[in-house]
Amino acid sequence: MKRKIAVTLLSLAMTAGLLAGCGSGGGNDSNGSSASEGAKTDQGGESDEGKDSDQGKESVVIWDYFETDAQKNMMQSMIDGFNSSQDKYEASHVYVPFADYEKQLTLGMASGELPDIVILDGCGMASFIEMDLFGDVSDADIKWDEYMEGPMSSTMADGRHYGIPFATNCTALFYNKDIFDAAGMEYPDENTTWDDFHEMAKALTKDGVTGFGNAATGTDEGTFQCLQWLYTAGGDYQNIADGIDAYNLMQEMVSEGCWSKDCVNWTQSDANNNFVAGNLAMQQNGPWQIPGIEKQAPDLNYGVTVLPKKDADSGQATSILGGENMGAVKQDNMDGAIAFMEYYDQTDVMIECMVQYGSFPPKTEAAQDSYWTDDPIQKAFIKQLDTSIPRGPSASWPAYSDAIQTGFQEVMTSAKTPEKAAEDTQAAVDKVKESEK
């Protein structure tokens, strides 16, 4: 019964075109072959094309949806490193467009044509674990206790491991220093409360500049950015009522014009483009935007700090985890897939890959490398990761996300009062909870 529910929810997710919060956009070209061209592996069996490569090594095929040059170069460097590290396996990767990724995995499960390893958005892994795509790798020689709790939890079910976190990130608060300086205002920092943030945004909304903006589009990309406000207010993805203060803040600020009303249609790229253009004094966004800012606006005088906390007595604000996981497809022989994960589990390998990738390592020790901690902007994201949590994790996440983001859209457009939106969103969330039983 649960598997049927998961399949149905996944279909809904693909229909709605849910987007990940991991900032993996870029060009459309690919260094890898397409899914239709790559070697496929039958679940529970061997590859249709045989496991031996030209060098007599066993083939390990990886699917990914990476599109930017940095991401593609990182994948090839990682694969080259793995291939040269031993003489038993030969890894290669296959590019599958992100828009088709979950669809291709679902079709692959039906046809038996699947890779050995799947790299996928972290919030989607629970659904595929429920659908039995991934095999249990709990006995692998992986340093499980070195991973950050949030990313690691998104790879697990019932206390068992079905993969490892690959990359992790979160959103934080970007601010334009020149706009703050011109207004004679202090920059936001770790002590900034919602009241402080609200006053900053109001004071800075003038002369064609809006105080704050984020991505609140009606997809999982919007959920990824808006959900942290609900958690910081005291709610969670199954408990909307305790987070109603987030609804109140959003509706008030949008009504005042200091939180952009256009956010309900904005992706994360849209928010960043407006920030770079000087149309926003502050934005909520992720570290994947940094390379683009350096390229498009190298002279932009900006900073990054943690998101504002609810009040002076509250701890650091919550943020929502983005990033990818790496899972081994369930089959009779998973040794090659496990060997690749064990290779990536090495701290030095992970650091090198994430420096190229433009994200953060999911291991605590790796994330403390000087590459990140010596840079004030990168350091802010590392601090925000301390209080970042995954979306869900739940096999029903697409349905939860749809219900939650509908509520945020209703609040930000003033289609409903915060009280009515909270009531209706809670009812929609409760229906999803009931379907899981």
Image (cartoon, rainbow, N blue to C red):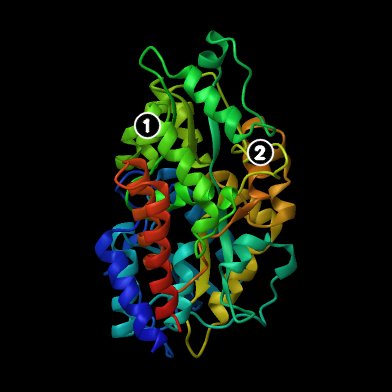
Q: Residue visible at 75% across and 53% down?
A: 365
Query: How far from the left and from the top, in percent, is residue 370?
Result: 73, 39
Q: Determine whether 329 is above or below 237 in the image.
A: below
Question: Which quarter of the image is occupied by the N terminus?
Answer: bottom left
Q: Determine whether 356 is above or below 123 in the image.
A: above
Q: Which of 306/104 is in front?
A: 306
Residue under label 2, please give it.
311
Asked if the residues shown at circle 2 and circle 1 are in contact, with their CB atoms under 8 angstroms apart, the answer is no
Please indicate whether residue 108 sits to the left or right of residue 244 in the image: left
Residue 350 lies in quadrant:
bottom right
Local crowd size for mark 1, using a 10 Å CA cut-off: few (<14), some (14–19), many (≥20): some
Label 1 is placed on what type of residue? Ser
Question: What is the spatial separation of the Cα atoms under label 2 and label 1, in whole angstroms?
Answer: 22 Å
Q: Which of 37/156 is in front?
A: 156
Q: Secondary structure at mark 1?
A: helix
Number of numbered labels in the structure image = 2
Residue under label 1, please give it.
255
Label 2 is placed on what type of residue? Asp
Q: Residue visible at 58% across and 35% down?
A: 194
